[in-house]
Image (cartoon, rainbow, N blue to C red):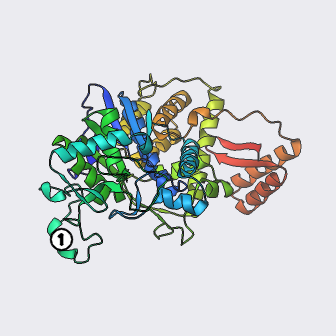
Amino acid sequence: MNLYNTLTRRKEEFKPSDKNEAKVYACGPTVYDRAHIGHYRAYIFVDVLRRVLKYNGFQIKAVMNITDVGHLTDDADAGEDKMEKKATSEHKTVWDIAKFYTDDFFTAMAALNVERPEVVCRATDHIAEMIDLIRQIESRGYTYQITDGVYFDTSKLPDYGKLAGLDLDQLREGARVEKNQEKKNPTDFALWKLTPTGVRRQMEWDSPWGKGFPGWHIECTAMGVKYLGRQIDIHTGGMDHIPVHHTNEIAQSEGAFGADVVRFWLHNEFVMVDGEKMSKSKGNFYTLDDIVKRGLNPLAVRYFFLQAHYRTPMNFTWEGVEAGQSGYDRLLDKIGELQAKTKNLKIKTKNHNLKLKTEKAQELSKAFLVAINDDLNTAKGLAILWDLLRDQKITDEDKLALALDFDQVLGLKLDQVKAPAAVEIPAEVQRLVSAREQARQNKDFARSDDLRLQIQAAGFEVKDTPAGQVVREA
């Protein structure tokens, strides 16, 4: 199994550091607003990673944080806390805001069939761990305090910025107008922000440095180490996390422990919307409600994202998702047909250990494993699934068994598809179907299309398959 490590800029063979258990940390949502399609891609990617690890027989311990404090509106440690700002605008408590949008996030994840991590941890439940970690960084000489908080001195790390390939000399030359003149270096970042004099925040805590709240980056290091130890196998996030958030997480680990605690850094690419950056002002900030209102299955969105490699930028359009819906519907129809032919055969699959009768099916099983183990190549995996379903030399039993096996990774709920119920087709519809078949044989496609419309008007639909016409209720 090979994964692309952002830190080394190459694919590396993955093996867990602790026997057979893979330890994974995923940057979770900042719960000040609704989850949107950009988030959907990120967490479908994380879900596929989990599923591929399990498909390879590894045990999993996955942790996801819920950022409910400390994420400011500006990555330069300036501006308002996003949670406090949202609470003020909605005239609610920050705790109400956090609960509402956390619940909304997991509702969307369930609709997309994203498995819940073993550990979900909130920043506000781990303030003590963050304070202890900051004190450890402080004891090793990596911090300094200024008017608005405690900062990490990035000049103490010669290779700071290696994850993003930052040119620190260029950054220093370009920092002629620094937002915080007290900072020693433009890349220094807040570990603990102090509440300004005369200000009362809804979320603030006592600390050795004064009343305040944690910086955004410290929570992930503190909670990751608490639940996974000082050897985290994989840390995931979006490409936007590389230059600031994850760069600073590495700095914190090196400041506290003398080394980065993460072995593999994995990042998914951005989602554009109709060729533009997603933003509320442009009206292209789409959520689960928007998907459902268009009559689309959320799993069609999952199918849409699986068609591209997670490190490839994607352009989200409604036409693209509708095409994904069509592809997903065809897939469900095919699985339903196989269930009918095999009489809803109960097939149990685990770790792709199947007794396949067809040699070609065995070849495709190996090809699928190679594809997903090549840095989670779901696009190729989907193509192999369709090759399987179209191959007329493979038995129906092998097709169904292998499709359900592949779905352990794809997560499209193919195991819930049942054979279509038998429906009595009226004699008049049967006559139309027979006439249409004759028209097709005569290559009279205009009449064939006309008869299809008559069949639809009668409440039925007809599909052309290699085995002939298939009729069912519309």
Q: In this orientation, does residue 229 appear?
A: yes
The correct choice, above or below, for 425 with respect to 95 in the image is above
* Residue 373, horizontal then vertical, whole percent: 33, 39
Where does the N terminus fall, quadrant-wise?
A: top left
Determine the image quadrant of residue 264.
top left
The correct choice, above or below, for 438 with respect to 391 in the image is below
Task: Give the left or right position of residue 407, taking residue 70 as reference.
Answer: right
The correct choice, above or below, for 296 with respect to 396 in the image is below
Residue at x 51% of width, y 69% of height: 274
Name the residue beneath numbered marker 1. 172
Task: Give the left or right position of residue 465, taking residue 353 as reference.
Answer: right
Residue at x 44% of width, y 44% of height: 124
Amino acid type, mark 1: Arg
* Residue 140, horizontal then vertical, whole percent: 15, 45
Q: Residue furthest bottom?
A: 176
Residue at x 57% of width, y 69% of height: 283
Task: Give the left or right position of residue 466, taking residue 457 as reference.
Answer: left
Determine the image quadrant of residue 171.
bottom left
Q: In this orientation, does residue 373 appear?
A: no
